[in-house]
Image: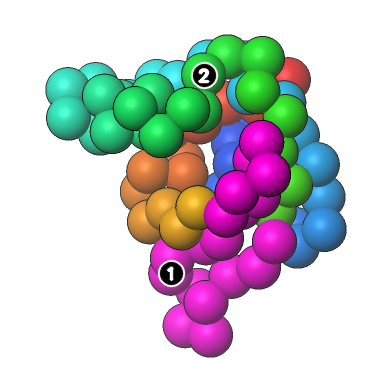
Amino acid sequence: MKRTLKELSPGERGRIKTITGNGSIRRRIVDMGLVPGTDLIMERYAPLGDPVEIKSQGFHLSLRKEEADTIILE
């Protein structure tokens, strides 16, 4: 069973296993430093649920839910 970044609750931790997105979405995620093996923490969801905020490698990132859904966790 695969678990995506979008499914984490605030405060939960995860490690990136793979990124399934293609094209510009995948390139944007990798350019931000989110590569397989990277640890992250789900910080919070926006009031309406989109975007999500994560903390990774000491910095905060906001991702749309559709982008978070392409990140598979271990």
Vertical order, 7 against 36 (above or below): below
Horizontal and vertical percent position of residue 69: 46, 41
Asked if the stretch drawn in magenta spans residue 48, the answer is yes
What is the quadrant of the C terminus in the image? top right
Residue drawn at x 26%, y 24% is 27
Amino acid at dot 2: Val
Kind of residue indicated by mark 1? Asp
Residue situated in front as seen by the camera: 36 or 32: 32
Tell me which corner region of the image, top left, top right, bottom left or bottom right, holds residue 2.
top right
Instruction: Say whether residue 44 is left or right of residue 46.
Output: right
| Viewer can see residue 63 | yes
Please say whether residue 56 is one of the residues in the magenta stretch. Answer: yes
Q: Is residue 15 above or below residue 60?
A: above
What are the residue bounds of the magenta stretch?
43-60
- Asked if 37 appears above or below 54 in the picture, the reply is above
Q: Residue furthest front?
A: 58
Which residue does the image show at 51% across and 19% down from the upper left?
A: 35
Q: Quadrant of residue 20?
A: top left
Asked whether the residues under the numbered discs 1 and 2 touch, taking CB atoms below 8 Å apart as contact, a structural biologist would say no
For the N terminus, which image quadrant? top right
| Residue corresponding to mark 1 | 50
Residue 35 numbered mark, or none: 2
Q: CA distance from mark 1 to mark 2?
A: 22 Å
Picture residue at 36% right of the left edge, 48% below the top: 66
User: Where residue 33 is drawn, which disc sits there?
Assistant: none
